[in-house]
Image (spheres, grey):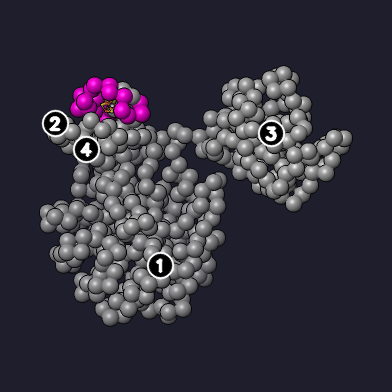
Amino acid sequence: MTKKKLGPMNLYPLLPRTNCGECLPKTCMGFAVQLCERGLTLGNCPPLKAPEFQANHDKLEALLAPPVKEIVIGKGEKEIKVGGQLVMHRHELRYFNKTAIFTTVDDTMIADDITSLVQETSSFSHPYIGHTLKLDGITIRSRTGNAENFRKTVEMVAGLTDLPLILWSSDPGVMSAGLGVAGDRRPLIYAADESNWQEMSELASSTGCPLAVHADGNVGTIRSLVSAISDRGVKNLLIDPGCGFGEALPKSLDNMTMIRTSAISGEDSLLGYPLIGSPVTLWDQGNSLPGEAIRWMESCLASMMTIRYADLVMIRDPSMWSTLPLVVLINNLYNDPRKPVSVEPGLRVFGTPDPVTSPVLITSNFALTYYTVLSDIEKLNCYLLVADTEGLSVDSAVAGRKFNAQKVADIISSSGISKKVTHRTLIIPGLAARLKGDIEDAINWDVMVGPRDSAGIPAYLREKWDGVDHKPGWSYR
Ligand code: SF4
């Protein structure tokens, strides 16, 4: 049966309805709206904790449970959550819990190679519009099928990193050896299939670890396995429907879409678990292509599977240039589309500005604009005021009156810039040129119109700022 879309009116009757004001919206209806949009949780309503509301609390919890279950892998500070999705399409609300990327080592690799891959994964870091993009964990795969080899490899990797782990073997004896040394880290057990699901279920049950369910290309088998495994009380599951290549790829992507559609629509709760994409198996295909080409294909496949709802992808190694498109895609896909990507308004100081000679510039708080300006002026000694334009770029904010004389006056006043410089000259973006007169009237400063593109700021300052008699000497650092 198709699940009805949850709305505030489904939740409001179960709230205390006293409008006590203890939550941020201060009214029960406002709180119901925030619950629907996942801006607040039930814990934000203190009266709901009272014993007389326990039954309502439980009903609300059931109504709010995401159709794709949220699963935790790992423990402590580095644990990750996957799944927890509420919608099929990002624009309907937003996606939760970014697709996790795991790189892969195996028990045939020499110690130096394992160490370098684990270290490269742990230290992977790429700054991107105010975020630091990182990788999430390490998969340890048994290729030899030897329990002692696997145990040693798992022990080594666990000693090298505190990132979450996936243990990969279809042999319950080998898996048991790995869990013996890393079971307390709550790794993902990968994977239960038709041949081993009873033993793997027991391992998941006895260790409390999440369990992946795998059946290559067969959604019916996955359903049966999930049903049988959950009947045994193992509920923290992920689903890997297989990763086909070449002509088999469209079928794999269709399967992922079908599984996610069935879960989100409420038609099939047995498929309501996070999805795993395993493009790392591309390396098993006996491909004659050079390694670099396979790496790019793997990144491309992982990206396609991410777009088709994969909550976790396994790739081989963390080569920066092949992995970068994937991490950027994931970051963009998981941003909240309802919120412009913005930075905090306020004053930024670059280098060691001088109160007499250093320029004061202003821009909007749209993150892309801010980080572009930042990269263009970071080698200067200057001040930058970031106006609150509600996350809009300068030209949109001027058109929408979010960047106006009053906003500039507000940031001049709240930033305290008047106490930091003795001059009274502000450089506004060229895209806000038409506001020059209004701003001068509002703040009683001289206003200079800067370039339309922030890349031109250094050249502009050399030409215009140096030429102003009372402000010589601004400089590069
Ligand atoms: S705290 Fe709870 S009872 Fe109070 S207004 Fe908010 S939702 Fe209503």
| Quarter-of-image position of residue 28 | top left
Q: In terms of secondary structure, where does tag 2 sit?
A: helix
- The label shown at residue 52 is 2
For the record, the magenta segment spans 2-25
The outermost residue toward the left is 231
The kind of secondary structure the magenta stretch mainly shows is loop
Label 2 CB, ligand 1: below 8 Å?
Answer: no
From what the image shows, is residue 266 above or below residue 298? Answer: above
Identify which residue, 138 or 160, lies in the foreground.
Answer: 160
Q: Are marks 4 and 2 in contact (CB under 8 Å)?
A: no
Q: Is residue 15 magenta?
A: yes
Residue in view at x 68 percent, y 20 percent: 442
What residue is shown at x 20% (from left), y 43% (from top)?
268
Give the residue type at disc 3.
Answer: Lys
The kind of residue tagged 4 is Glu
- For label 4, the residue is 61
Q: CA distance from mark 2 to mark 3?
A: 56 Å
- How many C-alpha atoms fall within 10 Å of the one at disc 2: few (<14), some, or many (≥20)? few
Per the rendering, the mark at residue 469 is none
Helix, strand or loop for disc 3 = helix
Amino acid beneath label 2? Glu
Marks 3 and 4, how far apart at CA: 52 Å
Q: Are marks 3 and 4 in contact (CB under 8 Å)?
A: no
For the residues carrying marks 1 and 2, which lies nearer the camera in this image?
2
The circle on residue 161 is 1
Sequence-earlier tag: 3 or 4: 4
Q: Tell me the quarter of the picture where residue 208 sits.
A: bottom left
The reply to whether callout 4 and callout 1 are in contact (CB within 8 Å) is no
Q: Is residue 402 left or right of residue 176?
A: right
- C-alpha span from label 1 to label 2: 46 Å
